[in-house]
Image (spheres, grey):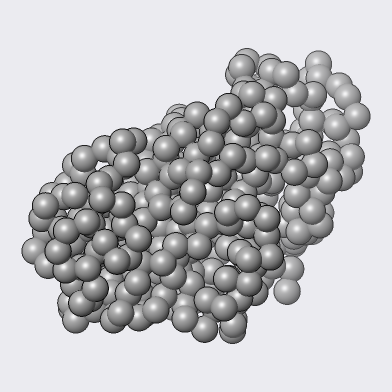
Amino acid sequence: MIARRALAAMAALLLVTAAVGCGADDRSNGDGGDGGDSGDGKPAAARGAPDHLPAHATEAKIPLRDGERFQFLSMEQPYTPTPPSGGTDEYRCFLLDPHFNGNTWIVGSEFLPENADIVHHAILFRVQSRDIAEAQKVDADSPGDGWTCFGDEGIRRDGLGSTGWIGSWAPGGTERLINAKVGFEMAAGSRIVMQVHYNLLATNGKAPGSDKSGVRLRLMDGSADLSPLQTTLLPAPVELPCPPGETGDLCDRERSVADLTARFGDEAKRVANGLNLLCNRGPARPGNTQQCDHRAGQDAVVHGVAGHMHLLGRSIKVELNPGTPGAQTLLDVPVYNFDEQGARPTPQPVTVKPGDTYRVTCTHDATLRAQLPQLKPLKPRYVTWGEGTSDEMCLGIVIWSKP
């Protein structure tokens, strides 16, 4: 149960950049969806798409391939983040309606941050028809545009299963399309939740302006012969003590976790502690390097892998079946750069069998806190897994399809 809750909460990250996500403008005219039939029988303009792409949207770097079209969606109005509890981070979810009248494939998605100075990362979630009423209620019950969401899209989903990830963006993320017949399958009537993580650490929690970010979808009709893509998240604990020479109340793990809970709620505490139960089968093991093994539950073909940490990250690696004759390294980033987190396609598709082991390993460096301008003003602290930029993460992201 703890493992399930921990994994559900991890979906908030994806701070990462699911490789297959990222796209372009709209149909062959590249105008963002204002002209012509969208392919589902409804003119693009009727979907709420603007007459032109916003000024902050760059031109698509990869042209449309046969059978593809583009559609632009954005939040309805500019939003000015206000982090809760005096913090510097806010996670805000916005409900987007692409007006899919029939089954549709998303084969690429490019998040377009309008105010890149405050947007830390973004994730796109699929909302099926049966969950739309709940999403609309959460939206209506929350003041302003969108709603506060921690851990996932912030709605009670109908039924069990993993969170419906379809794409993500983080600094450095660019469009990387897979040369395979795969995509994210969207049923008629589906909606999209766009979660935006706003970080105001550089401005002491005060927004320097509003944001009206959006997403450019690369689509194909549901009749296309594609296999559905799925995303598996591979979290590991973060248990980073204060380095020698640093002291303070928050260098105590219990007090640090209490501060994390005050900023993000009880779920944040359950995730930080639950990861140790999931990965270490016991209490926290302080140290710069942490890892976690995850058992594959079914046959899969891996197409891309990404890794995500925050500002104290030094290196991250994702392996398949380590320590065996068939061991493979799926991702190896020996010098981690927060601004270059885009998912990396595997050179060739990698076959995974039930019972195979994924291992994610991360190394963090607490001495960076005294060197980085964003973190220098903060008190020394014992760092655990957390959603804030001043907290840390260790997350591998595997993008795969069924054989």
317 up-or-down from 364: above or below: below
Q: Quadrant of the N terminus?
A: bottom right
17 up-or-down from 300: above or below: above
Seen in the image, is 184 located left or right of residue 242? Answer: left
Question: Can I make out residue 332 in this image?
Answer: no
Q: Quadrant of the C terminus?
A: bottom left
Q: Nearer the viewer, residue 118 or 43?
A: 43
- Which corner quadrant of the image does residue 246 belong to? top right
The residue depicted at 45 percent of the width and 58 percent of the height is 124
Residue 296 image point, x, y percent: 49, 71
Q: Nearer the viewer, residue 195 or 161?
A: 195
Residue 87 image point, x, y percent: 74, 36
Seen in the image, is 310 located left or right of residue 246? Answer: left
The residue depicted at 44 percent of the width and 70 percent of the height is 191
237 up-or-down from 374: above or below: below
Exactly how many numbered labels are in the figure?
0
Q: Nearer the viewer, residue 330 or 268?
A: 268
- Which corner quadrant of the image does residue 399 belong to? bottom left
